[in-house]
Amino acid sequence: MAQSDVSKVDSTLPSCKLEEITDEDGLNKTRLFCQRCPSLVLSPKQAKLVKKEFFLPNMFQKNEHTPLEGVTLSDFWLVTNMMTFDNVGFSKAVNNIMYLICADCEMGPIGWHSVHDKKAYYIAVDRVKHG
Ligand SMILES: [Zn+2]
């Protein structure tokens, strides 16, 4: 099934992979795309790589129920202003957390946002395509 590739518990990316997508300032070197469709999520040099552990449910579509199973991820792109995104959608807030989803195909979560912190939007490195 299409979901099997994102449900593995391998949550930490090898540092060589992270170096490939990060510039000398720790910013994203490449554009970030949805994994399922050509939608552009973020342009280069707009987000900073941060280490932060956060549990994300497995990928699902907006009209489906949120899966209970998921994975704790630790590599995220931090965006400080919502206007920085090229395209992004949001799920409904649950326990003050909104999930970031693709604006076009509505697959997600590709990241998360706490309603208590208006200056922090996290995109999971593992959940977007870099290129
Ligand atoms: Zn998409």
Image (tube, helix red, strand yellow):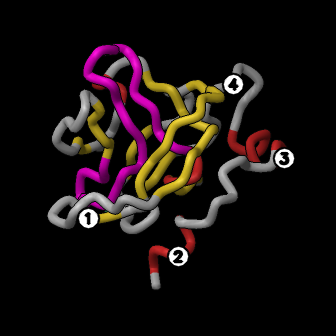
Magenta residue span: 101-124
Mark toward the start of the polypeptide (1 vs 3): 3
**Which is in the foreground here, disc 4 or disc 2?**
2
Membership of 40 in magenta stretch: no
Callout 4 environment at 10 Å: few (<14), some (14 to 19), or many (20+)?
A: some
Amino acid carrying label 2: it is Ser
Which label number is shown at residue 16?
3
Residue 50 horizontal side relative to residue 81, left or right: right
Q: Residue at x 37, y 51 (%)?
A: 109
Residue at 63%, 38% in the rendered image = 75
Amino acid on which disc 3 is placed: Cys
Q: Name the residue carrying label 1.
A: 61
Image location (x, y in percent) of residue 23: 72, 30
Q: Nearer the viewer, residue 52 or 22?
A: 52
The residue at which mark 2 appears reads as: 4
Q: Earlier in the sequence, mark 4 or mark 2?
A: 2
Viewer-nearest of labels 1 and 4?
A: 1
> Is disc 1 surrounded by few (<14), some (14 to 19) or many (20+) residues within 10 Å?
some
Question: Farthest residue toward the right?
Answer: 16
Circle 1: residue type = Gln
- Residue 53 versus residue 32 in the image, above or below: above
Using the numbered discs, state the Cα–Cα distance from disc 1 to disc 4 in whole angstroms.
31 Å
Give the left or right position of residue 131, taking residue 20 as reference. left
User: Residue 111 appears in which quarter of the rendering?
Assistant: top left
Q: Nearer the viewer, residue 81 or 112?
A: 112
Kind of element beneath mark 3: helix
Mark 4: C-beta under 8 Å from nearest atom of ligand 1: no
> Earlier along the polypeptide chain: callout 2 or callout 1?
2
Per the image, the residue denoted by label 4 is: 26
Q: Magenta stretch: residue 109 in it?
A: yes
Secondary structure under tag 2 reads helix
Q: Residue placed at 45% from the left, 32% from the top?
A: 122
